[in-house]
Image (cartoon, grey):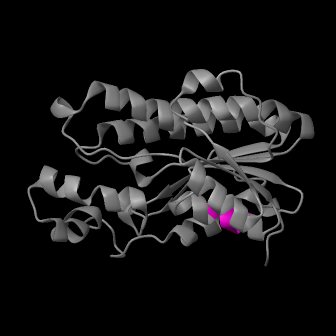
Amino acid sequence: MSIDLTGRRALVTGGASGIGEAVARRFADAGAQVTVADVNREAAERVAGEIGGRAWGVDLSDTVALRELSLDVDILVNNAGIQHVSPIEQFDPERFAFMLRLMLEAPFLLIRAALPGMYERGFGRVLNMSSVHGIRASAYKSAYVTAKHGLEGLSKTTALEGGPHGVTSVCIDPGYVRSPLVEKQLADQAKAHGIPESEVLEKVLLQDAAIKRLVEPDEVASLALWLAGPDAGMVTGASYTMDGGWSAH
């Protein structure tokens, strides 16, 4: 059954590549008016131009600039994020703070900016792109794991507050996705674990998965599309894993 988002306005952060780009394209194909938000303005404009959407070049780590923001959207996808692999005792404190601003504080501020309009219209979908690291931990990823665990709590709180107003909030929890974020960490993972880069995929990234392959961005986007659609009105406060069985352990 096709999902129709005609008339809906969606904002996808980190929408110029990887999961975000796949989500933006799926939503646009379903009829939504999509705003592609990304720190890379040129890439955002490219994707927006290809899908008939709008581009928003924005540094979401500049959270002070987001405090007075007002967003008139029906669907908010908090997807923007980065990874940094390092033991805690060597983890740069400013990098830790930066990652929490980008992946936890910014989603809070975007949700805060979007809820008044959603409440007024009696409809809203907040999709938080978490991770299996939102419910599990891995060594050497203290900032990422902390941010994603916090995002899970923020999503649940949003669900409880938004429910009476027709607003749902969910987390999508993929395992390792074939994306620039994963590709960029292969060398760091090899260094942290003391193994060749060629062994990282098998011995680190997919070690706990029952299905030994990366998740494809479009697979995540297909779930996001359903969660944004009319049949997901009772799905809120939940976390949907797409991790090849990792979290079944």
Q: Is residue 135 visible?
A: no
Tell me the quadrant of the picture where the N terminus can be found: bottom right
Residue 102's place in the image compared with 202, above or below, is above
Q: Position of residue 97 (x, y in %)?
A: 38, 27
In this image, 142 relative to 115: left or right?
A: left
Residue 162 shown in magenta: no
Q: Position of residue 58 (x, y in %)?
A: 60, 39
- Residue lying at the far bottom in this picture: please name it: 1
Q: Overall secondary structure of the magenta stretch?
A: helix
Q: Position of residue 117 (x, y in %)?
A: 85, 35
- Residue lying at the far left in this picture: please name it: 194
Residue 229's place in the image compared with 143, above or below, is below
Residue 194 picture quarter? bottom left
Q: How many numbered discs sit on the rendered protein?
A: 0
Q: Position of residue 235 (x, y in %)?
A: 70, 53
In this image, 141 relative to 236: left or right?
A: left
Residue 24's place in the image compared with 78, above or below, is below
In this image, 100 relative to 51: left or right?
A: left
Residue 184's place in the image compared with 149, above or below, is below
Q: Residue at x 57, y 71 (%)?
A: 218
Q: Residue at x 79, y 76 (%)?
A: 2
Q: Is residue 241 visible?
A: yes
The boundaries of the magenta stretch are: 23-27
> Which one is in front, 244 or 18?
18
Q: Residue at x 11, y 65 (%)?
A: 196
Q: Residue at x 44, y 31 (%)?
A: 100
Tell me the quadrant of the picture where the C terminus can be found: bottom left
